[in-house]
Image: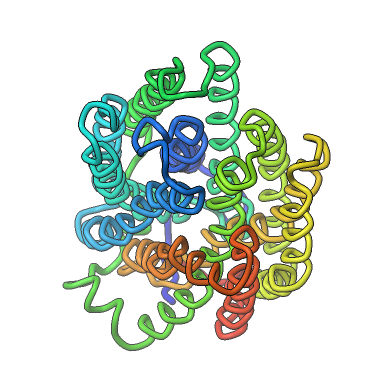
């Protein structure tokens, strides 16, 4: 891994570096805000897009597909924008992707439902979420390596955790907006105000946030000095999938497949499972998970600091052990008692499950993955390792239906959570420690 001279000191941040890191945090906040719109904001209004007489498991599957469609689009975005991020620059690539997902989010806010266009409504929703995923994949593929290349080496763990901390904060923001709307714009039957038009408001907010971050990024973020001074690859993808870079990619791919399997069980499926299968009140679920994710932000910073001190590899292996043992047991207790639990009980169990897995994987993931690839393929390597590993977990809803033939559907996430933890252990153990790598 080459060492390059850049306009910063290892013990401090430049003014440009601070702005770039903040911009990456805001961009990831908007990215994840967009990701969670169909799960949180659209969850209480899914009957707007689907027939009312569907079975609970079918409705839950369709609900998850609106989430998975975005995840499937992200690898395509990583391929396209990763190439240009390494060839023409991180900054330009990030700006183009931001314009794209801002426009798609606005279009989503205007979609008609099942009453007007039948199944075309859910079809358009899933398709546009897929296109949205392409642009969202471009955002973090370009903006995150750009920010990490401005971070001092001895603070990369904390910087990476701060950037990815946009995820729980975005969850909190969507939850607050949805909670307020559900209080004043009630959800219920197909003709209820929230189902007919209330769900559109968070999507419009997402569009405005995307536009704001684009303007901040355009005005304040310079190109990466590390990238400008580096030797450019003739074909970043060809270089990525050959030699040492290929080995690095495969190792990270295994680890991140485990991360996404665990993430889907906890953050992708759990809200819909509680509301649509176990019939827990939507406001109770939203409020409990809101508080959980507010705490998670500080958990990300804590684990980012732990990884910087004790090594990212060590912490990732430890988290994989938790994800495959303690977390599944707590997940079982959460689901089994959900219908008779208070908000406090739900919050404590959900927090216990999430704090064991998410901060230690996502909080360390950005720094770790960018450190695994040299500058000439860093955008492609980071974007594809983060995104291609989503593909297998994107079929999560079908894995659940298959497992449902052998066990109660509401517990089908647990074996996949265990598998995710095992893959995290294998992937992290396969790779080296990275916290002292020079860019």
State the residue in front, 318 or 205: 205
Q: Position of residue 227 (x, y in %)?
A: 32, 58
State the residue in front, 156 or 48: 48
Residue at the farthest top position: 184
Q: Is residue 30 visible?
A: no
Q: Quadrant of the N terminus?
A: bottom left
Q: Is 228 situated above or below 276?
A: below
Q: Is 233 situated above or below 164?
A: below
Q: Is residue 165 left or right of residue 401?
A: right
Q: On the image, which quarter does residue 258 sit in?
A: bottom right
Q: Position of residue 191 (x, y in %)?
A: 41, 18
Q: Is residue 371 left or right of residue 325?
A: left
Q: Is residue 417 left or right of residue 372?
A: right
The colour style of the image is rainbow
State the residue in front, 51 or 77: 51
Q: On the image, which quarter does residue 236 sit in?
A: bottom left
| Rendered residue at 75%/54% (across/down) | 336
């Amino acid at each position: 891994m080459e060492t390059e001279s850049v306009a910063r000191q290892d013990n401090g941040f430049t003014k440009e570096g601070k702005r770039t890191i903040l911009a990456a945090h805001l961009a990831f906040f908007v990215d994840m805000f967009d990701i969670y719109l169909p799960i949180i904001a659209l969850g209480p209004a899914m009957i707007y897009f689907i027939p009312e007489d569907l079975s609970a498991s079918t409705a839950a599957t369709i609900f998850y597909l609106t989430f998975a469609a975005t995840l499937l689009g992200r690898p395509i975005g990583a391929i396209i924008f990763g190439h240009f991020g390494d060839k023409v620059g991180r900054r330009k690539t990030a700006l183009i992707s931001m314009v794209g997902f801002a426009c798609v989010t606005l279009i989503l806010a205007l979609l008609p439902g099942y009453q007007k266009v039948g199944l075309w409504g859910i079809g358009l929703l899933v398709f546009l979420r897929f296109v949205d995923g392409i642009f969202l994949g471009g955002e973090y593929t370009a903006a995150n390596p750009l920010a990490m290349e401005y971070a001092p080496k001895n603070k990369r763990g904390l910087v990476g955790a701060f950037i990815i901390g946009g995820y729980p904060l975005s969850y909190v923001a969507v939850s607050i907006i949805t909670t307020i709307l559900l209080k004043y714009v009630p959800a219920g039957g197909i003709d209820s105000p929230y189902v007919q038009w209330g769900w559109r408001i968070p999507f419009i907010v997402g569009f405005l946030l995307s536009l704001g971050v684009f303007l901040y990024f355009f005005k304040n973020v310079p190109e990466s000095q590390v990238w400008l001074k580096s030797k450019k690859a003739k074909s970043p993808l060809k270089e990525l999938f050959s030699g040492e870079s290929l080995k690095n990619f495969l190792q990270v791919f295994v680890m991140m497949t485990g991360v996404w399997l665990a993430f889907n069980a906890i953050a992708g499926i759990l809200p819909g499972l509680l509301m649509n299968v176990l019939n827990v009140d939507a406001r109770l679920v939203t409020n409990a998970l809101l508080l959980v994710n507010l705490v998670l932000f500080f958990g990300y910073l804590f684990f980012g600091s732990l990884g910087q001190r004790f090594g990212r590899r060590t912490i990732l292996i430890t988290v994989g052990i938790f994800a495959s043992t303690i977390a599944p047991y707590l997940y079982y207790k959460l689901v089994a008692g959900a219908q008779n639990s208070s908000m406090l009980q739900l919050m404590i169990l959900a927090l216990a499950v999430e704090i064991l897995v998410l901060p230690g994987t996502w909080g360390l993931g950005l720094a770790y993955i960018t450190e695994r690839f040299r500058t000439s393929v860093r955008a492609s390597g980071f974007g594809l390792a983060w995104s291609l590993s989503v593909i297998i977990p994107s079929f999560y809803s079908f894995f659940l239906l298959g497992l449902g033939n052998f066990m109660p559907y509401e517990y089908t996430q647990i074996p996949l959570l265990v598998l995710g933890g095992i893959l995290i252990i294998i992937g992290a153990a396969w790779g080296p420690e990275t916290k002292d790598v020079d860019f």
